[in-house]
Image (tube, helix red, strand yellow):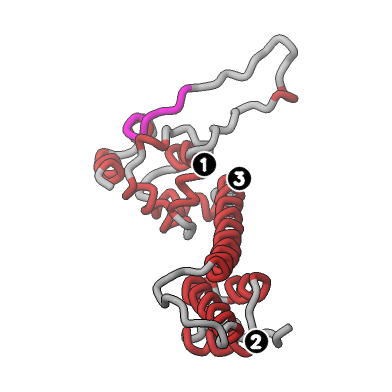
Amino acid sequence: MTNTLSRSPAEVREVLYEFSLAKEVPDAELLDEFVRRYPEHADSLTDFAVALVVDSLRREKADEPAIDATAVSPAVSRAMSTFQNALYANRATQEAKAVQRTAMVSLVNPFDALDRQAFRKLAKDLNANAVFVCKLRDRQIDPKTMTKGFVEFVAEKLRVIADGLATFFAGDGQATLQPQFLKADEKVEVKTKQSFEEAVRSSELSDEQQRFLLGL
């Protein structure tokens, strides 16, 4: 197989040149290897691989009568199908990994990394107070009522990705008491989530703070 390729950004022509030297006639395995290393050139690599196979087939049949250049032979169709399948399989794998990463983000509470001082600083940075930030942390606010500007604002202050934070907010709220601290005949009260405006209005914020948050 080929030597390990540089993982730094490469021009298309350099990647295609390296690909052409790897094997006289490329196969799906080789294409998959290059696509994984250079996903930004996946389409160019696939087209180039098909072209190399077609050229190889034409050389093998050089002694046969000329064929219609616009016709697609069964061999060419098979080559295109093979390489397209390899490309699609690679893309499906990458998409599955992206979904998995999103799912992992949703399990992480970005507020957990804050100590008491950082928690208070966040409240100040958000022009809010600890009561309101606790509601965010415990997912007591209906995320469907939050504005995009507000989520992006909080994400910026937390230094996290807005989409990941939105995914976290969309999760279930945390119960105030865990089952092990309850008596046998007691049940955990599941509170209905507040709307964003309700949460702002009921968090003992000043009029200026309320206007600021609701205006995001």
Neighbor class of circle 2 (other Cα within 10 Å; few <14, some 14-19, many 20+) is few
Residue where numbered disc 1 is placed? 137
Disc 3 residue type? Answer: Leu
The residue lying at 51 percent from left, 41 percent from top is 137
Disc 1 residue type? Answer: Arg
Q: Earlier in the sequence, mark 3 or mark 1?
A: 3
Spatial CA distance of label 3 from label 1 is 13 Å
The residue lying at 55 percent from left, 56 percent from top is 95
The residue lying at 60 percent from left, 65 percent from top is 82
The residue lying at 39 percent from left, 55 percent from top is 125
Q: Is residue 193 magenta?
A: yes
Q: Which residues are magenta?
A: 192-198
Rendered position, 21 above or below 39: below
Spatial CA distance of label 2 from label 1 is 58 Å
Residue 66: where, in percent of width, then height? 47, 82
Q: Earlier in the sequence, mark 2 or mark 3?
A: 2
